[in-house]
Image (cartoon, rainbow, N blue to C red):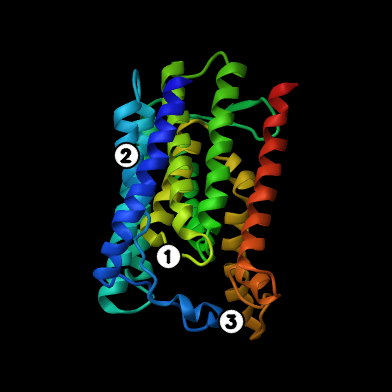
Amino acid sequence: MKQIILSTLFCALLSVIFGYVFIPVLKSLKLGQPILKYVTSHKTKSGTPTMGGIIFIIPLVITFLIFSSGDKRLSIFVLAVTVAFMTVGFLDDFLKIRLKRNEGLTPLQKICFQVAISIIASIVAYKSGQTFLNIPFTKKTLNIGIFTIILNVLVFVASVNAVNLTDGLDGLCASVSSVNLLYFSALIYLQVTAFKGIYVNESEYFNLSLFCLNLVAGLLGYLLFNTQRASVFMGDTGSLALGGAISGVSVITGNALHVIFIGVFYLLSALSVIIQVAVYKRMKKRVFLMAPLHHHFQEKGYSEGKITYAYSFITFLIGLCLILVYFW
């Protein structure tokens, strides 16, 4: 416990230091985020520094390498996945700024990178012995063997893109992701207690919890600069990394199906875009005032802060319902 507290404090402070150091650098380099023209309420945000994901990802890497101990094969796997997706996001952000447009990598390029990382990560997870699924709202476990590879690829690609779509309001993605990571940290601890036949030792799970809590600490430090009005955006550098971290932890612990419930607002963000595009192409009508869903609520008159709080609060309640079964 002492190790977790110290590492969490260290990562939080380090992310704040990184924020104060790097934001002026990003501004001086004119690494500002181009804003979508149709989001008229965000016109004043144009030029806000992006690539802010480095403010919490680099401190996470440093902290984890210093404080993790014992067996950490699984946590290194999650860290590698996080950094891999962060790299794709960084490239996308860099091209956006370089080309002065809202699109960096083309959709095809981005999905190819994501699928490639997802396939490699899913095969590695399978080779490590992870072939089971923990069923949400129960203590039941199902072994699906090699089919975990297919499922996990879908989870990686869907989660990374859904988290990316959720990053549209000040503080939204970081707040919701913090609750998600707190949930997985608690879930891992409870499952180690509930399931005596875990496929790796407890040291592995301890380091996974450490990873989650350190990332939460980094996000809390980052939120100091990202709450309304944001002085920096995480960009794809941060959102793709967060998607990789959350899906990586869920996949390697057999909790891939839990992402559907604890990540309900990621899912709704993605579904709202899919529905909006599909209906408009077919009927020339809009289901939502604007997609993703958080922009619909914004157009309805809700403030960014209220939407962020509601998303985080509901996610927190869902998390409590999901882990309640482990106390029966």
**Counting residues from the N terminus, which is met first, the one under dot 1 or under dot 2?**
2
Three-letter code, disc 2: Val
**Disc 1 versus disc 2: distance between alpha carbons?**
23 Å
Q: Residue furthest bottom?
A: 284
The crowding category of the residue bearing disc 1, from other C-alpha atoms within 10 Å (few below 14, some 14 to 19, many at least 20), is: many
Q: Position of residue 148 (x, y in %)?
A: 48, 37
Task: Look at discs 2 and 3 and give the one toward the viewer.
Answer: 2
Quadrant assignment, res 62: top left
Residue bearing the label numbered 2: 61
Q: Secondary structure at mark 1?
A: loop
Q: Position of residue 177 (x, y in %)?
A: 53, 48
Q: Residue furthest right?
A: 328
The crowding category of the residue bearing disc 2, from other C-alpha atoms within 10 Å (few below 14, some 14 to 19, many at least 20), is: some
Q: State whether residue 275 is above or below residue 260.
A: below
Three-letter code, disc 3: Lys
What residue is shown at x 55% (from left), y 35% (from top)?
184
Q: Position of residue 162 (x, y in %)?
A: 52, 57
**Disc 1 versus disc 3: distance between alpha carbons?**
36 Å
The crowding category of the residue bearing disc 3, from other C-alpha atoms within 10 Å (few below 14, some 14 to 19, many at least 20), is: few
Is residue 119 visible in this depiction of the protein? Answer: no
Is residue 282 visible in this depiction of the protein? Answer: yes
Task: Look at discs 1 and 2 and give the one toward the viewer.
Answer: 1
Q: State whether residue 111 is above or below residue 6.
A: below
What residue is shown at x 30% (from left), y 29% (from top)?
66
Residue bearing the label numbered 1: 231
In the rendered structure, the answer to whether residue 106 lies left or right of residue 149 reads left
**Counting residues from the N terminus, which is met first, the one under dot 1 or under dot 3?**
1
What residue is shown at x 62% (from left), y 44% (from top)?
262
Quadrant assignment, res 88: bottom left
Three-letter code, disc 1: Ser
Q: Secondary structure at mark 3?
A: helix
Residue bearing the label numbered 3: 281
